[in-house]
Structures are given as C-alpha cells and as structure tokens.
Amino acid sequence: MANLTPKQRRFVEEYLSNGENVVAAYRAVYSKAANEKTAWTNGARMLKSTRVAQVIHEAHQRAKKRTDKIMERYAITKENVLREFARIGFADVTDVVSIAGGKVQISDTAGLSEDAKRSISEISETVSESGDRTIKVKSHSKIAALTALAKHLGLDKPEPDNDDALNDMANDQDPERIDRGESTEEG
C-alpha cells in the first residue's frame, strides 16, 4: 500500500474490512454525511483508480492463498462437506444412546462409528451437590443438515411436472417399507 495516499490506504482498509461495502468505506474515510448516491459514485470512482484496484487485487490474491491453504490442510472439498451433512442428517440417535429398563444408556464413544461420532455436537456432564450425575448428549441439527443437502440436490425447488412420485409417496399404504429396504410391488 506504499503507493497510496493515507486516505486511499484507509479507504482500502475500510472497503476490505466492511465486506467490500463501497458506500461504508467512502463514508468512513471521506464524508460521514454523504448521501447514498454520492458515496457510491465517489467510492466506485476510487475503486477504478489503478493504484487502489491493484492493492485490492493483491489483497484478494493473498486472501485466496490463505483460504486455499486452509482448504487443503483440512481437506475441505465439496464431497467432504456433503458427507458431513449426510452424517448429521441421517444420524440415528440409537447409535449413541438406548433405553434399557427405563433408563437411558449411553454408548461408549470408543465403540461408536465415525458417522455417529461426527453427528454429536456436545457431550457434557454435571454433578449436583447431592452427587447425582446428569450426562447430556447433543447432536447437530438434523433439520439444518437435511435442508442443506436438499438445497444442494435441488429438492428445495418445486417440480410441477413431476408430481407422480409425491402422489405415490402420499398414497403409500406402508411408507416404512423403504426404511426396511423393501421395494414397491412393481419394482
């Protein structure tokens, strides 16, 4: 940022730190009282400055390199993100806890599947003054995970010409058959 004036430098800093909001950046540096149109017009003019544009481009390149390193380090890929959503969305609570003799039994985490482990967001224990223990096992939101998967698959968009599958599901006399792995009588 050596080639920028102090105000240009501050504008770039404000622009990048405010989610690239040109109006907010202009107002922060040049005129807090500027109306929306003036701030946008003058801020956009600043962005067209060769020196300012170059500094912003370099900042974006540095940010992209940092992001790429993080994505590589943690293996953040589309497939891995979808797998995590699926693990949460299709998690079965009985993989982690069960009820036996009217009491909740928590499975030993060493014996849990990777899917079951990843579906858990929190395990906590509290001990009351009388010595009673309470263990809490909390899962990530299945609804949020399934919503994200549905959106990715395009299931959140209506298909008006393909209502047969929905009608078949709605009229199915035994909807649990799919959970049991059974097919329809025709298939």
Image (spheres, rainbow, N blue to C red):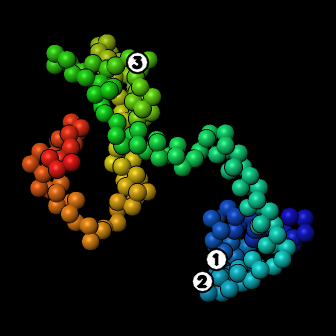
The residue indicated by pointer 3 is: 111
Q: Residue at x 9, y 48 (%)?
A: 173
Q: Secondary structure at mark 1?
A: helix
- Residue sitting at x 30%, y 67%: 158
Task: Find numbered disc 2 in the image and state the secondary structure of the residue it sits on.
Answer: helix
Between 146 and 51, the one nearer to me in the picture:
146
Between residues 97 and 87, which one lies in front from this camera angle?
87
Give the mark nearer the N terminus: 1 vs 2. 1
Q: Secondary structure at mark 3?
A: helix
Question: Please, is residue 45 above or below residue 148 in the view?
Answer: below
| Measured Cα–Cα span from mark 3 to mark 2 | 60 Å
- Name, please, the residue furthest toward the top: 131
Q: Is residue 100 visible?
A: yes
* Tag 1–tag 3 contact (CB < 8 Å): no
Indicate the amino acid at tag 2: Glu
**In the picture shown, does residue 179 fall above or below 68?**
above
Callout 1–callout 2 Cβ contact below 8 Å: yes
Q: Nearer the viewer, mark 3 or mark 2?
A: 3
In the rendered image, residue 40, in percent from the top left (x then y), is placed at 65, 82
Left/right placement of residue 180 relative to residue 40 reads: left
Query: How crowded is the residue under tag 2: few (<14 C-alpha within 10 Å), some, or many (20+)?
Result: few
Q: CA distance from mark 1 to mark 2?
A: 7 Å
Q: Which residue is mark 2?
A: 36
